[in-house]
Amino acid sequence: MGSALTRLRAGGFSIGIEAPLDNDWTPLGEQARRAARRLPGEPDLQRHAELARLADRLGFRALWVRDVPVYDPAFGDAAQVFEVFTYLGYLAGITDNILLGTGAVVLPIREPLLTLKSARSVQQLSDDRLLLGVASGDRPVEYPLFGRDFDTRGSRFRDQVALLREGGAAHLPQGLDVLPAGGPALPLFVAGLAQQQPAWIGQHMDGCLAYPGTPQDHAQRVAAWRAVAGDKPYASFIHLDLLAQADAPLQRWRFGLRGGRNALMAELQAMQAAGVDHIGLQFRRNERPLAETFHEIAEHVLPHFTAHAPAMAV
């Protein structure tokens, strides 16, 4: 079936989904949040498992989750609420083919050996479907809570990457090991620059998770990435509101767009032409029911980009 990296790029371009699987940033979603007395940015999780299974069955390539250990009202975004590795283990058990990515684990605030064990566990439980996105973090309030120094997060990031690469051997007394062991190397994607120089990123990372932007933005970023990383995969995200009218024109907003499926298809084709390898779609601003939207994209959009991708296991 190939490695997770190989499967991400099979067919030349792929489309995934970013959690949370809720449209809580719409007017109706906001009304529902207030009625349920959820915090601002805390999604409705009643259908998350059903929608994850649906995305898997429909052929979306990856499902991305985020690492938000503490809710901060100043940011107002709880992501998918569940702890990232716990949730990945759950998703590994209810899906079969969809790759499971993190966008991204904040390495400097985590215990390094436990991060290694958690990642290896998800990798094995998911039959090598893990794409481990990592970052240095951008929320200063979190660092003192975990006894970490915000100003040294760059060096801690490098140290943790080294540990993930060598499997913890340099940090353990002779005879000790972190299990499960013996699996493939963890595929590491970096979100942003993680306080590092581009050349270091290109050498030590397996892929790039770029912030959302236009195709023109990505063309410039891809060129910079290729200069230091060669042909390693480049992925990004779109915050999408897919309108029911197929020909509805594209309207841009910060991090994404609104439009019909033809506008979405044109945008994805432009992303592919810019050198992007994978786009994850986020639906928190999507006005229509998510299941309906997933079905439309699977029927009318995915086939244009997956015609040459190998069939996944059933």
Image: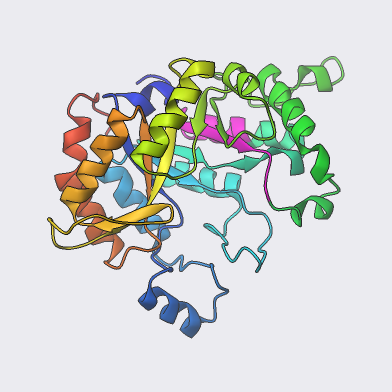
* Residue in the picture at 24% in, 25% down: 309
Specify whether 122 is left or right of 143.
left
- Residue occupying the point 22% across, 31% down: 306
Q: Quadrant of the N terminus?
A: top left
Q: Nearer the viewer, residue 280 or 52?
A: 280
Residue 257 relative to residue 19: left or right: left
Give the color scheme: rainbow, by chain, secondary structure or one colour.
rainbow
Name of the residue lying farthest toward the bottom = 35
Give the number of marks.
0
- In the rendered image, residue 124 lying in the magenta stretch gets the answer yes
Q: Nearer the viewer, residue 89 or 235?
A: 235
Identify the image quadrant of residue 72: bottom right
Q: Position of residue 276 (x, y in %)?
A: 37, 31
Whole-percent x, y for residue 25 in the image: 43, 68
Above or below, 77 relative to 179: below
Q: Report if residue 56 lies within the magenta region.
A: no
Q: Is residue 51 visible?
A: yes
Q: Is residue 258 above or below residue 228?
A: below
The part of the image, by quadrant, that contains residue 29 is bottom left
Q: Is residue 233 visible?
A: no
Quarter of the image that includes the C terminus: top left
Location of residue 119 with respect to 241 vertically, above or below: above
Tell me residue 33's x, y (percent).
Answer: 47, 77
* Magenta segment: 119-138
Position of residue 167 measured from the top left corner of the image (x, y, whole percent): 70, 20
